[in-house]
Image (spheres, rainbow, N blue to C red):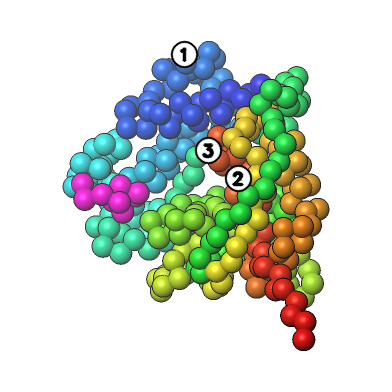
């Protein structure tokens, strides 16, 4: 049933690898194994935009990051990403982001970058007959300690959402993630972009999404986002090492969260510190795996007179 979701995801991955070349529909169709017509029509149906529009958006996003992070000539960046001239890049940049490439380079304000699309998910893998897990790759969730220094966090806190799915049913994923990606140059080295999690407000648990920045950050706060100061704290990190996202994501998250939400910190001489700090969630399956971080503080020894 979801064969085309998998095929379109392969197209997306192929496009990303060939953005600085001249990816043709014919070459991509040969790689995927379907006719150009079917590749084009199914891509539009599943991804929600034409292949040409998708490529244009990703090229412009990659060009924006090079303008921000390198000192390459604007003309060279334009040619690298398929624009006929610097003027052509400028027209596209102004149309999408409201400023010229030169102005953006001098002042890289938050912009909504076009993200890499994801259209093939674990539930699609299972529904097409794949195994739900691979016991040889899964391990038990474990715990370690980590200290995170004082920092600021720029994000959206939603008291009406308790998890990732509920949050994105209420917010524009492409817009928010695009803005976060455009600000990756100011992200905190530990609380990086797309580090999400949970917070507590008046006894109610909510979900937040955004990115950390250093404690001395005094730059731009994107519209709809707010910034909060997060004190330094030790954290118990409940984790599973890298895993196959399509095969094992659900099972890995279940194992980690079951351990995280039922753990008794007193056995290690700690108590939760969630009245001052928020719980963090890191989800990078092929790089670090899945982690839930809960803040803790030492239980002070009782003094007897």
Secondary structure found at label 2? strand
First of labels 3, 1 by sequence position: 1
- Rendered location of residue 175, percent (x, y): 53, 54
Residue bearing mark 1? 30
Q: Main secondary structure of the magenta part?
A: helix
Residue 293 seen from this side: no
Residue at x 59%, y 66% (from the top left corner): 233
In the rendered view, would you say 7 is above or below 94? Answer: above
Characterize the local packing of mark 1: few (<14), some (14-19) or many (20 or more) Cα atoms within 10 angstroms: few
- Residue 287, numbered label: 3
What distance separates the C-alpha of mark 3 from that of mark 1? Answer: 30 Å
Residue at x 72%, y 21% (from the top left corner): 130
Residue bearing mark 2? 283
First of labels 1, 2 by sequence position: 1
Q: Is residue 65 magenta?
A: yes
Discs 1, 2 touching: Cβ within 8 Å: no
Q: Quadrant of the C terminus?
A: bottom right
11, 193: nearer the viewer: 193
Secondary structure found at label 3? loop
Residue at x 71%, y 49% (from the top left corner): 165
Residue at x 44%, y 29% (from the top left corner): 15
Q: Quadrant of the N terminus?
A: top right
14, 266: nearer the viewer: 266
> Where does the magenta region start and end?
64-72
237, 134: nearer the viewer: 237
Discs 3, 2 touching: Cβ within 8 Å: no
Instruction: Report the side of 177 relative to 159 (left or right).
Output: left
Characterize the local packing of mark 3: few (<14), some (14-19) or many (20 or more) Cα atoms within 10 angstroms: few
Q: Quadrant of residue 117?
A: top right
9, 53: nearer the viewer: 9
In the rendered view, would you say 268 is above or below 291? Answer: below
Secondary structure found at label 1? helix
């Amino acid at each position: 049933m979801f064969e085309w979701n998998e095929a379109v995801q392969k197209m997306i991955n192929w496009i990303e690898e060939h953005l600085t070349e001249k990816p043709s529909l014919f070459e991509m169709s040969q790689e995927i194994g379907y006719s150009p017509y079917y590749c084009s029509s199914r891509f539009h149906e599943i991804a929600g935009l034409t292949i040409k529009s998708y490529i244009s958006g990703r090229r412009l996003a990659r060009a924006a990051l090079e303008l921000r992070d390198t000192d390459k000539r604007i003309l060279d960046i334009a040619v690298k990403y398929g624009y006929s001239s610097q003027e052509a890049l400028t027209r596209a940049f102004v149309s999408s982001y409201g400023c010229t490439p030169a102005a953006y380079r001098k002042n890289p304000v938050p912009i909504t970058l076009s993200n890499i699309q994801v259209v093939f998910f674990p539930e699609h893998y299972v529904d097409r007959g794949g195994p739900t897990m691979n016991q040889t790759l899964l391990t038990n969730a474990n715990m370690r300690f980590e200290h995170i220094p004082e920092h600021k966090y720029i994000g959206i806190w939603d008291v009406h959402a308790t998890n990732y799915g509920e949050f994105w049913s209420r917010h524009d994923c492409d817009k928010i993630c695009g803005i976060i990606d455009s600000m990756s140059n100011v992200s905190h080295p530990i609380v990086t972009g797309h580090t999400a999690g949970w917070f507590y407000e008046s006894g109610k648990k909510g979900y937040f999404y955004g990115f950390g920045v250093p404690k001395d950050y005094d730059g731009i706060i994107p519209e709809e986002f707010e910034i909060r100061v997060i004190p330094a704290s030790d954290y118990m990190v409940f984790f599973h090492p890298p895993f196959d996202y399509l095969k094992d994501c659900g099972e890995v998250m279940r194992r980690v969260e079951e351990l995280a939400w039922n753990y008794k910190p007193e056995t290690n001489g700690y108590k939760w510190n969630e009245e001052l700090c928020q719980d963090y969630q890191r989800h990078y399956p092929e790089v670090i795996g899945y982690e839930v971080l809960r803040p803790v503080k030492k239980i002070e020894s009782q003094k007897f007179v």
